[in-house]
Every structure is written in structure tokens, then in C-alpha cells.
Amino acid sequence: MRPELVLLLLLPTGALAGPRFEPVALPEHTYAGGWEHFVGGGVAAFDCSDDGLPELYAAGGANPAKLLRNRGGMVFTADTPPALALTGVTGAYPLDIDGDGLLDLAVLRVGENLLLRGGPDCRFTPFDGLDFTSDTRWTTAFSATWEGSNGLPTLAFGNYVNRDDPNGPFRACDVNLLYRPEGNRYGPPIELTPGFCPLSMLFSDWGGGRADLRVSNDRHYYVSGGEEQLWAMETVPRLYGLQDGWQSHKLWGMGIAARDLDGDGAGEVMMTSMGDQRLQRRMKGANGPAFEDVPYALGTTAHRPYTGGDGRPSTGWHVAFGDVTNDGRDDIFIAKGNVEQMPDSAWEDPNNLLIQQPDGSFVEAGMDAGVASLARGRGAVLADLDGDGLLDLAVVNRRAPMELWRNVSEPEGHWLAVRLVASGPNTQAVGAWIEVDDGNGPLRRREITVGGGHAGGSALAEHFGLGSVTSVRLRVIWPDGTASDWQESAVDRMVILWR
């Protein structure tokens, strides 16, 4: 069936020189709690009111989680239904679990994880009949995908330190859990072991031709003997190894994000850490998921604060790609902040906004852009929250109020937002690829995924900055491999592609 193209025009607004962001008032919300909430603090962005504007659901740790309803014009109000006003929440991810076209939530907690069914006007209820069960682990990472023709998604939950281990917390990392559907229900989870204290995970095509699970782990607690992991989603999941081209490496892994930055068709991956932030690219000519670090001169390491007077190593958390001025080049945002009072890491640690240059290198712009907060940043959202075609920013902070910035940059080019809608069960077309041809070089390719970041994600239209081009061609490679026809589109608008 040929997909139908629906175009919705959104008018751009005036702005100041950029990249520039202005703070916007929010109802006060703080991520707080003891050592179990040193990590986490994610935020989910999704439209649960069906008005075209995304809401924000922010983890609270020891405080109740909060739903911030988007009233338009960057005005948010606290309107949390009882089902979402939970304590112990470390993060949340939106996805349509039951294929009814309404977004649901996977809620991560110190305690029982929950799958909540979305209803009209941001109402949520526990799922009935999925047979999903959760114990009371310390969950800090999540990702989901659809395997084959399954009617339900495969869910992965990453668990941090095993709090019941009397020899912990060091070398006491818990196992991770994989839930594969059995018909219209979930059976007992599969243990992915060993676990090395993950703080982010992401199902994506890492070079194996299917959605495999990459896990970024925190060396602070696995200490030795652990590493970053990539699980091959075979009938019996297995870890990739050197025989597959996988390169063993270790870091204090916090967040993860993937994007094809250079248009070569092989996506890069960014991982945040204590100290170096690590951008990796696929090795040229390699078979399988073989990655290497990019050169330091590219400017993505962001290993020390650039303001605040603290020269100790930085601590990166959430990471997101996005073109903040629509110049046609993806930039990188990293939420930063000390775990608590770790003496070997910077205490005054500003967020990074790394702007990509024409030669592919990156330059720090956080201070000039106005987002160099010195609060302990955790989860974040980089998304168009007001529908003006510019990416805005929200950051959850530990023991400090959540922050929101409106992007008031002078646009350097045009943009296109692309949303995919499919018939059930996979209504978000997770695993699909969007291809945009602007006539000026390699295709812009974007995979639809659920997961990554740090403890929170978005279910929104994909934003493409386009630079000076005034029309593009686009198509979709749907999850089953079927390609739509190429279709023409003007710019500065949202495109909805229906299957």
C-alpha cells in the first residue's frame, strides 16, 4: 500500500541572534532523594492531550513524579493524574505498547516498574491482561523494539546495583531483564547476565541488520571485569565479541544517543561519562558492529567545564542530537552535573551545547546560548515544544528545580518535522528509517527508536534542520523493509506519513 502524505503548515516566529535560549518559568519540580537517586532523573516528552503540543513527565525520585501539561506558547501547568503521581520514579519512556494509537508509559523506579496504559486527555491506568510482572530492583535504563510480527514490543530494563547484595555496592551490579512477548502477553523475563550497572541502553541497528541492544555501563560500580555491551537479539540473546568485530571498551557510562552525523549511512554513537564524553563511529570496511573513537580534535570530548572556574573532570548525563539553528548540521546537547559531591569531579559543571561546524567539528556554545546551568543536570529533552520549528530544551536537575529554555535563535535555514503513523501493533513504526534527500549531498537518514538518553525519551516527530533548501524528497523504509515511494515536500512544516 502506498503511504499517504499529509502536510500541516506551522509558521516560524521571529527570534534573536543565535544560538540563543531564554529561560521560561515552570511549576517547581525537583528530582531528590538519597543515594538511590544520585542517578536517574529522566523526563519523557510526548503528546498525551492530542493537541499537537508535547507534555513533559518528569521523574521526582523521593518526590512525586510530575506531569506538566503543555498549554501552548511555552506555558506548562502541573496537572498530574493520580496514576502518574508516583514516588521512587527514576525515569519514563513513552511508546504505544498495545497498538491502540494512544501513547503509553514505561515507568522506571527504585521498586516496581510499571507499564501504564494511556487514555484520552492524559489519563493513565495500569494495563490489564499483559501479565507483565516486575520485582523491586533499582532500574535505571530502558529500551524497546518490535521483533518480527509480534503483537507486543520487546522490552529491556537495565538494573543498577543489587541493593540486596551484602557485599555491595561495588562489584554488585544486578542482572538486566528482557521481556519478549508470548502472543498477547508477557512471560517471565529473560536475564541478561552479566550486568554491569547500566545507566542507558538502546535498541538500534548497530551494523548487524536488526535491532540489537547496546548497553552503556557505569564503571564506578562494576569497577573491574566489566565493559560496554552489545547484545545480539537472536533466539537466545548473546553478547557480541571480538569475533563479531565488537571492540571491548570501558567507561563510566551515563547516557547514549545515535545519529548519522556525516551522512555516510553508518550512524555514530555518543556516550556520556565521568570525564571524557565519547563519540564513536563505525570503522570503515568493517563487517559487523565495529566502532572506534573519533579524534579528539573533533571537539566532542567535553571533558572539563568551560565556565564556573572548576577544572576537575566533567560528569555527563543525558545526551541528545538536534539542529538547534536549522543550518542543516546536527548539534549535541549534554546535561552535566556532579553525581553528588564526588571530590575528583567538577562541582560547578555547566551543560554543553556543541555546535557542529561546516567541516564536521564541534564548538562549545553553551555559555553564549544561555544554557550553561551549574545545577546538577540529569535527564533532558531537546525538542520543539511550541511548534515554531526550533528545538527547545528542558532539563531535570538533582536537588534543584527543573529548568526550561525556549529557543529564540535566529534561524539559519529551513526545517522539516516528520511523523510516522502505522496500523497496529507497531503504530509508531519503531525500527523504520526516514530518508530525506535535499539535493545537496548524502541522504539524511533517521531511525525511529525507543530508548537511549538518560532515563527518559521522546515520542515526537523527527526534526530535520535543512539549511537553505526550499524543497526536499523523502521516503520511509518501514520496519518490514518495504520502502515507500519518494515524495516531494516543501519545508517549514510537519509531514505526517501514514502507512
Image: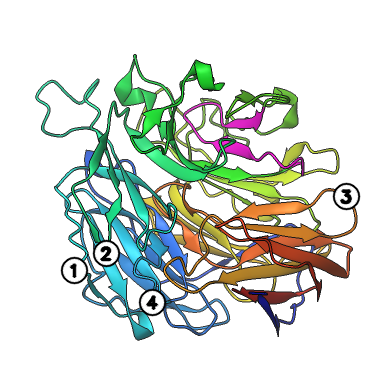
Marks 4 and 2, how far apart at CA: 14 Å
Say which residue appears at 88% left-offset and 49% top-offset.
Answer: 441
Q: Earlier in the sequence, mark 4 or mark 3?
A: 4
Name the residue tied to disc 3: 441
- Residue 100 is tagged as 4
Q: Which mark is residue 184?
A: 2
Q: Is residue 267 magenta?
A: yes
* In this view, 21 is above or below 452: below
Residue identifier under label 1 = 129
Q: Residue at left 79%, top 38%? A: 360
Tag 2–tag 3 contact (CB < 8 Å) = no
| Residue 326 visible | no
Type of the residue with mark 2 = Asn
* Range of residues picked out in magenta: 262-282
Label 2 residue SS: loop
Q: Residues under labels 3 and 1: Cα distance?
A: 49 Å
Q: In which quarter of the view is residue 192 placed?
A: top left
